[in-house]
Amino acid sequence: MNIYIDFDDVICETAKYFTYIAKELFDIDVPYKEVQFFNLQKSFDLSDKQYDELMRAGHLPENLLAYKETPGSSETINKWVKEGHNVSIITGRPFDSYEPSRQWLDEHNLESVPLFCVDKYGRESFNQDCTYSMTLKDLYSMSFDFAVEDSPAAFEHVMHFDGCTVAVYNRPWNENEALPDSRFVRCNGWQEIDRLLHNR
């Protein structure tokens, strides 16, 4: 089975860390459970300049390497690899965050899983001829049977994969989101995600 796994807030607790950065930079205190929008500029009520500063800080290598693992993620992913599944991590992180992101995965025992940076949200302003960077067209040319996502903004991308079951990792910013169709199933953690994969 070909499996697509998002990185932020699926494998690691990125948004929780961003709440700390917003507090440190701007003295804006939004508890994690009140992060109602995937768009952090809207969730934290930031100006364009503040948002750019937040994103730069959040993608500094030392911060990327500090994010905590989502409980059970690496254990479950390694189990899938041992079962013979082809697992790919598909992230919308900036292309220039690849190296620390790769290092984080290696440090969390996911060195055998490939990482691809995809311009999921139209943020990249330049092309990179790297084996790890992809356009949406490149992504859509791939085939996946199962996906794990948390971002409502990315649901449209996984809908391109015919017959793909999508585990939606429950997060505050997607709790009130209407799911596109019956292929999308809410899960409250990696145990439920693993159960969904094996019951599909």
Image (spheres, helix red, strand yellow):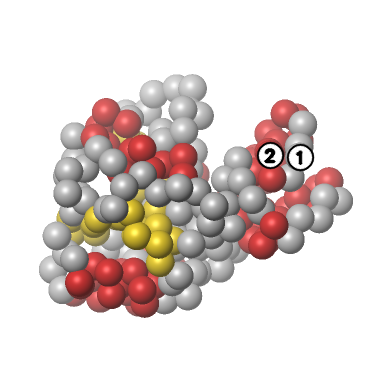
In the displayed structure, does residue 86 sit left or right of residue 48? left
- Dot 1: element: loop
Quarter of the image for the C terminus: give it.
Answer: bottom left
Q: Amino acid at mark 1?
A: Asp
Question: Residue 1 at what x, y percent from top left?
Answer: 14, 60
Residue 67, quarter of picture? bottom right
Quickly name the residue at label 1.
45
User: Front-most of 173 and 70?
Assistant: 173
How far separated are the C-alphas under marks 1 and 2? 5 Å
* As drawn, 195 above or below 164: below
Question: Residue 63 at what x, y percent from top left?
Answer: 62, 56
For the point 68% across and 38% down, which residue is it?
41
Whether the residues at callouts 1 and 2 have beta carbons within 8 Å, the answer is: yes
Quickly name the residue at label 2.
42
Question: Residue 183 at what x, y percent from top left?
Answer: 27, 53
Of the numbered discs in the image, which one, if any, rests on residue 196?
Answer: none
In the displayed structure, does residue 61 sit left or right of residue 118? right
* Residue 38 seen: yes
For the point 47% across and 75% down, which residue is it?
71
Residue 77, quarter of picture? bottom left
- Dot 2: element: helix
Would you call the spot at circle 1 few (<14 residues within 10 Å), some (14-19), or many (20 or more)? Answer: few
Would you call the spot at circle 2 few (<14 residues within 10 Å), some (14-19), or many (20 or more)? Answer: few
For the point 82% across and 50% down, which residue is it?
28
